[in-house]
Amino acid sequence: ADKNFEYPLNPAAKDWSNYFAGKFKSQHAKVEFADVGCGYGGLLVNLSTAFPDTISLGMEIRDKVVEYVADRIDTLREKEPGKYQNIAVEKSNAMKNLPNYFEKGQLSKIFFLFPDPHFKKSNHRRRIISKQLLAEYAYVLKSGGIAYTISDVEDLHQWMDNHFSQHPLFEKLTQEELDADPVVPLVYASSEEARKVDRVNGKKMIAVFRRK
Ligand code: SAM
């Protein structure tokens, strides 16, 4: 699956000129929210209007899905001029190249919504959350930045919860903090996978962590 991925040598080398629009259009646009494995982009679209002054980037590994999200954003921009200028999608392998895209402490939020479960034990190393990868996520998140995880797969939820909870650079948000966070409802309901789980009355398990 690892074909020729184009990715920047380092964050400063990335030219963002053709990603964002209007006042966000800049070679050195500063992405603050990253949706890792963004799928069809439902969260991104919601983040765009909920945080109109913040730049969000979806990262997705499947070509077809990347094309779909890019078209979706173009269509929204055409329909509602002046809106949806602060979101874009990038084809990327987020398990390998995050530090190529983002500087230390650049992100204030990172999302892992319904990641692929890789059920078999021999495939657990392919999971998007692991001890090694948490070190990278901690690196790109600023102190006080938030990592959101959600899954309908109990085993994967526990896995993500345990890894983050055990990591010295993250602390778990309390229920009161979750209740007060306006992003939590978006995490529960805005992505295509979240809606799919709703349609079968599945259970959605959330776990959210703060970068210390
Ligand atoms: N987050 C979306 C949602 O909630 O609707 C999509 C969930 S889908 C089950 C998982 C997505 O992660 C897929 O679209 C898959 O292609 C993507 N993905 C898997 N591994 C990835 C990687 N290493 N980098 C970027 N995206 C990845």
Image (cartoon, rainbow, N blue to C red):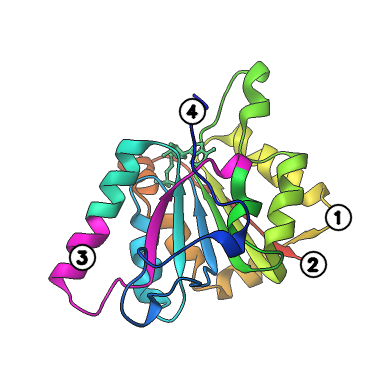
The magenta span reads 72-96
Note whether 19 is above or below 126 in the view shown.
below
Q: Nearer the viewer, residue 42 or 199?
A: 42
Q: Which residue is mark 4?
A: 3
Which residue corresponds to the image point at 66% horizontal and 53% vertical from the top-left? 99
Beta carbon at label 3 within 8 Å of ligand 1: no
Residue 76 image label: 3
Note whether 66 is above or below 181 in the view shown.
above
**Reading the chain from its start, which is encountered first: label 3 or label 2?**
3
Which residue corresponds to the image point at 34% horizontal and 55% vertical from the top-left? 42
**Could you give the CA–CA distance between mark 3 and mark 2, rounded to whole angstroms?**
36 Å
- Label 3: how many Cα within 10 Å (few below 14, some 14–19, many 20+): some
| Residue 30 at x, y percent in the picture | 53, 72
* Amino acid type of the residue that numbered disc 4 sits on in the rendered structure: Lys
Specify whether residue 200 is in view. no
* Amino acid type of the residue that numbered disc 3 sits on in the rendered structure: Leu
Q: Which residue is mark 2?
A: 212
Q: Which residue is mark 1?
A: 168
Which residue corresponds to the image point at 35% horizontal and 64% vertical from the top-left? 18
| Residue 45 at x, y percent in the picture | 33, 63
**Could you give the CA–CA distance between mark 3 and mark 1, rounded to whole angstroms?**
41 Å
**Reading the chain from its start, which is encountered first: label 3 or label 1?**
3
Q: Are marks 3 and 4 in contact (CB under 8 Å)?
A: no
**Could you give the CA–CA distance between mark 2 and mark 4, rounded to whole angstroms?**
35 Å
- Label 2: how many Cα within 10 Å (few below 14, some 14–19, many 20+): some
Residue 51 image label: none
**Could you give the CA–CA distance between mark 1 and mark 2, rounded to whole angstroms?**
8 Å
* Amino acid type of the residue that numbered disc 1 sits on in the rendered structure: Pro
